[in-house]
Image: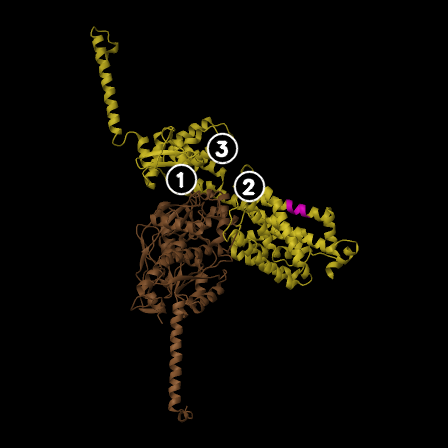
Chain colours: A brown, B yellow
Amino acid sequence: MAITEPTISRRGLARLGAAAATIAAVGAVKTAAAAETSGTIKVGILHSLSGTMAISETTLKDVMLMLIEQQNAKGGLLGKKLEAVVVDPASNWPLFAEKARQLISVDKCAATFGCWTSVSRKSVLPVFEELNSILFYPVQYEGQECSRNVFYTGAAPNQQAIPAVDYLMKENKVKRWVLAGTDYVYPRTTNQILEAYLIAKGVAKDDIMINYTPFGHSDWQNIVASIKKFGSAGKKTAVVSTINGDANVPFYKELGNQGLKATDIPVVAFSVGEEELAGIDTKPLLGHLAAWNYFQSVDTPINKTFIDAWHAYTKKPTRTTNDPMEAHFIGFNMWVKAVEAAGTTDSNAVIDAMLGVSVPNLSGGYSAMMPNHHITKPVLIGEIQADGQFNIVSQTPGLVVAQEWSPYVADTKDLIGDWRAPLHCGAFNVKTGHCTAGKKA
Amino acid sequence: MGAADSSPAAPALLCLDNVMRRLLAFFLIAAVSLASAPSKADPVDDAVAALSSGSFDSVHEGVDELVASGSPRAAAIIGALQNGKLYFRPDHTLYIKQDDGTYVGALTGTPIDAGNVKPVRVNNTIRGAMDAALGALRLFSPETAARMTAAEAVFHAADPSALPALTKALEKETDPAVKTRMEQARAAVILASAESAEADRLAAVSVLRVRGDIDARGFLASLSDQPPAVAEAIAGALTAIDRAAQLWSVAQSIYYGLSLGSVLLLAAAGLAITFGVMGVINMAHGEMVMIGAYTTFAVQQFMHAHTPGMYGASLLFAVPLAFMVSGSIGIVIERTLIRWLYGRPLETLLATWGLSLVLQQAVRSIFGANNQDVDTPAWMSGATALGGLTLTWNRMYIILFSAVVLAGLMAALRYTSLGLRMRAVTQNRRMAAAMGIRTPWIDALTFGLGSGIAGMAGVALSQIDNVSPNLGQSYIIDSFMVVVFGGVGNLWGTTLGALTLGIVNKFLEPVAGAVVAKIVVLVLLILFIQRRPRGMFPLKGRAVES
């Protein structure tokens, strides 16, 4: 610099300035043009379309495409069309993180809707936090998490598992419990919470049996037999099943074959919905239960409209709807409302605008986004019918607010998540008054 | 009154008597009709009103009231409710839907135009009450099977009010099996009732002790507030039942092991040919199984649409078809892919692994990612009891099927000329070629045979597992384990390997849990292979040594 300075003439300087101005102008024109031509807001869809989870997640991709199409038909968002960016993480957990990064950094998606298994969510979580983007997670899960960049539209344990256990205690006088699950993070955490809850309710430790099986377990003979044996101790017994995915079909088949009827030992499942039952003959399963926040059989006008639209979109009148689909329906509408309120798709503005947003759910009420980034939901208990649908036998009178940190687990009983000012913390310890994790950067 | 009075006033009195009677009757009728109009008095009407109220609690009450009313339509109405065929209108009238979609009045049984009706919904509590109620009502059914279920339902309900009906049914019963069931039901009722004498209770306990199954155990254990002597007898019975159950559980575990082993054997038998005999590391073997399962699905769909009368036999048609479909795909794979890779195990492994992904995605694109619903025919559903054993039919048939497949395969290898050539080619390829055997063609057929057997395994697996594009993946590792453990190239080794792994797994599972059991089996296998690298039954001879 010191050397070149004297040699630059005034004219030269002027020329330089002009050049800079031109570059700046061109740049400005370019950005303006970019905004003009890409007059769309991109929405990422991160669901496995191949591999083991394709069975569940493909449907969620379809429902997102339908919701985006409907929104575009209504005129889009902020005067722009929405554009879906679909990627396939192929049921491969590390690939979820890569694809998430691509959606945010390369495709510049304003928000992403995706993931099913907890392990895939845990895999993408650091990416969304690092790049400060937004993820909508639509599946019931084990709780114990509260990220600023994630909106949990599925149920926390107190919005599904605990009301189901309460129902069995009250309605069927169940005294003895089998907690059966697939061996991974969701069932283990849920069962830890449930065990603590049951013991707090006065159930003896001997009256709780916990059993884990690998993913895709197909030989249930002696597990079903041991459940039968456990149930012959003279106390009313029930099975709480967090068995996930494919393994459910052979499990229910074995229940049917060994003649374990719902009137003797009811099984209440947290991962079995209309979609999973589509692959089995449900006659032997009559009366076994599932707990969700939505069933296709919910009898409301808004649900009928939704199902009709779904059948028209998929051109298949037999396609079922299920709970995670409703979660996407709620999450998407909340996001649309928050973007409209914020007037921009900027992550920080939308994250702030999301809090308190309230949209209709499909069971006839309104779900609201709470400061812990979870939504309020009704809890429904359904019994399996012969046609593969659920007969709703119990519904909470009001909406249940999610407990993101379980009060039944010693480590987390004092924690709360609150993303409002001034707390801005995902794990605030109310005893010590410290934010233990997930502080806003 | 003086009807028999012989006084002169008798006619007048008689007349007055008559009038009085009529009046009385009139008042009675009026009183009855008055009472029934607002509520009470006619229990059937009450029951109908409760059943058509739409709340679970009142439907439950309605079932109980209907049974208590003794209405001749009670069995029909509750039966309809149990099958989801009972409908109601908001004006508290009930209808039963017939199979042809028309309705009859629930109380009249005559056809009627129902109009806008809703089904009466039930939950598990009501379902339990219905089982008990129908049990009591059907104890006198002319059909033996119905009486059997009825007795069992009464046993489960153990409702003291069923005792008179049960006693009456026992007197009339002629079938010894049903009679035993009824006696057991009576024992349960006696023990549950508060009024029974101690001697009766003791007799009842011994009846249930003889029954000795898991239901009897559960019932005995649930009893409380029994006299001390009875409580002692119950404790004794429980110990006896548990001791017997312990013995039976060993037999049960062996059965479970055999059944798991037979599944492993089916999955591995094809691999024993392609890998064991030909030495091809075929990672797409599982997909041949999967294709067999999808063939079953396709056959069922076709038969459902075209020959619904023979639907129950669909599996019998699926077996040869699955063999042919998977077998021909196997031949195509051998001719187009594998034959270029003989003697290059690593390349074979990678190529067939890639192929397995291609096949999976192809099936996913054609049939969709969702599980397909393959029906289990009625003759393969349910279970039978043999002493303290529960034998599920689907597993029994699979054990049989795998035995038949194995016998067929061995016979084919030993007694057919194709089998002879196959053995010749594997034992000494160049000599076989020198004798005029077209070795490439035999290679293709051998690979086709192995794949075809995998296809047949797919038919069996469609009955116990998910029919999804991932079906094969879950069996490929197990299949390799079985073949390596049993000894490469030896069908007896494969058989024994499969059964051993199955039984060891099933004995470990209750102790260690399913996840740990799998790990333990794998570790044991590795240790075993360390000591006997060629498996349990290694092939001997110069061909192997080289």
Residue B213 seen from this side: yes
Residue at 22 percent of width and 18 percent of height: B23
Q: Residue B303 carries which label?
A: 2
Which residue is label 3 attached to?
B145
Q: Nearer the viewer, mark 2 or mark 3?
A: 2
B57 over A135 or under it: above or below: above
Q: Earlier in the sequence, mark 2 or mark 1?
A: 1
Q: How crowded is mark 3: few (under 14 residues within 10 Å), some or many (20 or more)?
A: few
- Where is the N terminus of chain B found, in terms of image quarters? top left
Question: Where residue A121 is drawn, which disc sits there?
Answer: none
- The amino acid type found where label 1 is placed reads Arg
Seen at 44% across and 57% down, the residue is: A61
Sort mark 1 into few (<14), some (14-19) or many (20+) by Cα contacts within 10 Å. many
Q: Which amino acid does label 2 sit on?
A: Met
Q: Name the residue under label 1.
A: B127
Q: Give the range drawn in magenta.
A: B404-409
Q: Quadrant of residue B480?
A: bottom right
Which sits earlier in the primary sequence, circle 1 or circle 3? 1
Secondary element type, mark 2: helix
Residue in the image at 72% along x and 49% along y: B419
Along the line of sight, the residue nearer the viewer: B88 or A159? B88
